[in-house]
């Protein structure tokens, strides 16, 4: 085994360790704090939108350099701007989505005063693995649903 292979292996191990540490902290926070409030979820979505808007030029330039053939305008349209719409959609509908849904109670439980409802709850920590062709869009569009559901990334 060469020195280069040893170095790459240790970099991968340290990166994997750092990721595991972040995920563990997110899991602990989810357990400690429980499901985030409407306000917290909106804050996460607003921060994602702000990140895209505030850094759109830099993100588009980085994608143009990375792809080597994609124009900055194309990246702005296909990756940046098309990611903001789903985030805004989630923000707009979030309050309604968080409401419990009533369900019909089957006989004979209804006669006994039973009530049924569905309360959607976050799973906890969710990862996003994005393909290379639309790196920003295929990261931030799933984030809109992840944050709306109250999950952490």
Image: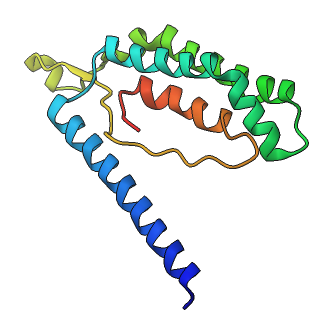
**Where residue 96 appears, x then y in whole percent?**
41, 10
Residue 140 location, quadrant: top right
- In this picture the colour scheme is rainbow
Task: Give the image quarter of residue 151.
Answer: top left
Q: 83 or 89, which lies in front?
A: 83
- Which quadrant: the C terminus? top left
Report how many numbered discs are placed on residues in the image.
Answer: 0
Q: Answer with left or right where residue 81 lies relative to residue 149.
A: right
- Vertical side of 32 occupied by 80: above or below: above
Residue at 20 percent across and 42 percent down: it is: 28
Q: Position of residue 135 (x, y in %)?
A: 68, 41
Q: Where is residue 15 drawn, in percent x and y?
A: 44, 59
Q: Is residue 103 above or below residue 137?
A: above
117 or 11: nearer the eye? 11
Q: Describe residue 40's horizontal placement relative to residue 93 as left or right.
A: left
Question: Which residue is at the far left?
Answer: 112
Of residues 100 and 5, the one nearer the viewer is 5
| Residue 85 picture location, percent across and down | 65, 16
Instruction: Say which residue appears at 47% left-offset and 18% top-offset.
Output: 47
Q: Give the residue at the far bottom of this rendering.
A: 1
Q: Residue at x 61, y 17 (%)?
A: 54
Q: Among all residues in the image, which is located at the extreme front?
A: 3
**Quarter the N terminus occupies:** bottom right
Residue found 65% across the figure and 24% down from its top:
83
């Amino acid at each position: 085994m060469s020195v280069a292979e040893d170095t790459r292996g240790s970099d991968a191990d340290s990166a994997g360790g750092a990721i595991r540490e972040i995920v563990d902290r997110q899991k602990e926070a989810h357990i400690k704090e429980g499901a985030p409030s409407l306000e917290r979820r909106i804050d996460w979505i607003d921060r994602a939108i702000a990140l895209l808007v505030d850094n759109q030029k830099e993100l588009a330039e980085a994608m143009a350099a990375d792809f080597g053939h994609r124009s900055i305008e194309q990246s702005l349209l296909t990756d940046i701007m098309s990611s903001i719409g789903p985030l805004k959609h989630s923000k707009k509908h979030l309050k309604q989505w968080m409401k419990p849904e009533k369900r019909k109670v089957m006989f004979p439980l209804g006669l006994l005063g039973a009530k049924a409802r569905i309360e959607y709850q976050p799973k906890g920590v969710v990862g996003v693995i994005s393909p290379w062709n639309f790196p920003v869009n295929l990261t931030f569009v799933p984030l809109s649903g992840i944050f709306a559901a109250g999950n952490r990334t």
